[in-house]
Image: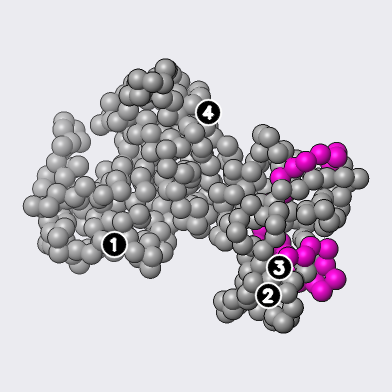
């Protein structure tokens, strides 16, 4: 099912009496989510992603704007009539019910022609339990399950009515690192198996990039960029998006352009054709450094960390806004650790220029 947001805005009363006006949690958001996609709604805490999810589910009503499921305007439709499955961060399982009972619960509230017998409910519950691979745990109660198993029960409960839209609100934040990896792969598998349009809220960019068909990057209630994960990583629209995506994070430098050359620390490090002379912010991905003893970019060498398939060269530069630079180079590259400095050439496709004041991207010709 396609989901469309038109000029969606949500305001809350401001509790701070010293500040006038409402708090704008979602600010004039317009968006179209294609049918059958898994979308990562990504951004820092307080950016409006959970509020957007609650507007989609019907738990909150928008101040302005409209929401369409397919061609149906559901803006004022109650949650129970939207056909939405919602998985919360804290699972929200009923402790006194078994796994079977928790999964069956949404089916117990069906009425009229949709009402099911007990056997029909159990058959449907077992079907989705097999999908999320917990069919051997049906008689257990939540306190007898691991965190990952509880999360699967919550997902099965959301899926049992075969919703038109599945909403996941930071569903992995309570799991340890290994279980997070396993569960996010399961979410991707389940979404592909069902074909249900799914929106996955997270502040973890690695999670969003690993399983999403599309990523929506939000800040301060507004959408900054929408696109495929690799496209956004390779072509960020502004400095916020560039710095939010990537592990290790992108390195940001105070720089300037003169004569179509990029200068960092007073030294020309890269040709930037078509860019006017100005003070700018430059950002370089960790993999954008290429070890070269005659390279244009020079930094103070701190240490070399061997990571198996890669080597991390930790160095420092006075114009870098962070304390250290981590340059990721191939494991077979040889760094002369006896020297006080290290030199690199910069890969043009991994260097981004931004306006110093606005943070908007400056495009380089060619």
| Residue 85, percent from left and from top | 31, 42
Q: Nearer the viewer, residue 343 or 333?
A: 343
Residue indicated by mark 3: 300
| Residue 279 included in the magenta stretch of the image | yes
Q: Which mark is residue 148?
A: 1
Q: Residue at x 27, y 43 (%)?
A: 161
- Name the residue carrying label 2: 330
Disc 4, SS: strand
CA separation in Å, label 1 and label 3: 45 Å
Which secondary structure, mark 3? strand
Question: The magenta stretch spans which residues?
Answer: 275-300
| Side (left or right) of 258 relative to 12 | right
Element marked by disc 2: strand
Is 346 placed above or below 31 here? below
Distance Cα–Cα, label 4 vs label 2? 42 Å
Of helix, strand and loop, which one carries label 1?
helix
For the point 54% across and 35% down, which residue is it? 223
């Amino acid at each position: 099912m396609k989901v469309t947001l038109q000029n969606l805005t949500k305001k809350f009363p401001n509790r701070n009496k010293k500040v006038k006006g409402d708090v704008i949690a979602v600010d004039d958001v317009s968006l179209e989510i294609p049918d059958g996609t898994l979308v990562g709604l990504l951004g820092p805490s307080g950016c409006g992603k959970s509020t957007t999810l609650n507007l989609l589910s019907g738990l909150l009503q928008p101040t302005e704007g409209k929401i369409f499921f397919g061609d149906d305007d559901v803006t004022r439709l109650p949650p129970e009539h939207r056909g939405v499955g919602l998985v919360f961060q804290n699972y929200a399982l009923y402790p006194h019910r078994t796994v079977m009972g928790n999964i069956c619960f949404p089916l117990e509230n069906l009425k009229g022609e949709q009402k099911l017998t007990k056997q029909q409910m159990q058959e449907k519950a077992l079907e989705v339990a097999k999908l999320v691979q917990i069919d051997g745990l049906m008689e257990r109660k939540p306190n007898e399950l691991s965190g990952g198993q509880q999360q699967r029960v919550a997902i099965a409960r959301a899926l049992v009515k075969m919703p038109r839209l599945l909403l996941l609100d930071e569903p992995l934040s309570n799991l340890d690192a290994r279980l997070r990896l396993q569960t996010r792969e399961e979410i991707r598998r389940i979404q592909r198996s069902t074909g249900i349009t799914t929106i996955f809220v997270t502040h973890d960019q690695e999670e969003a990039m690993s399983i999403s068909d599309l990523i929506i990057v939000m800040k301060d209630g507004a959408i900054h960029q929408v696109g495929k994960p690799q496209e956004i990583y390779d072509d960020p629209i502004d400095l916020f998006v560039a710095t939010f995506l990537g592990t290790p994070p992108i390195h940001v430098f105070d720089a300037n352009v003169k004569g179509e050359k990029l200068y960092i620390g007073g030294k020309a490090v890269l040709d930037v054709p078509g860019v006017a002379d100005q003070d700018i912010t430059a950002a370089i991905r960790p993999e954008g450094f290429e070890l070269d003893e005659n390279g244009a970019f020079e930094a103070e060498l701190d240490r070399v960390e061997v990571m198996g398939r890669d080597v991390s060269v930790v160095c420092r530069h006075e114009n870098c806004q962070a304390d250290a630079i981590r340059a990721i180079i191939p494991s077979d590259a040889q760094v002369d650790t006896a020297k006080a400095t290290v030199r690199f050439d910069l890969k043009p496709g991994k260097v981004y220029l931004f306006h110093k004041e606005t943070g908007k991207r400056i495009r380089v010709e060619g």
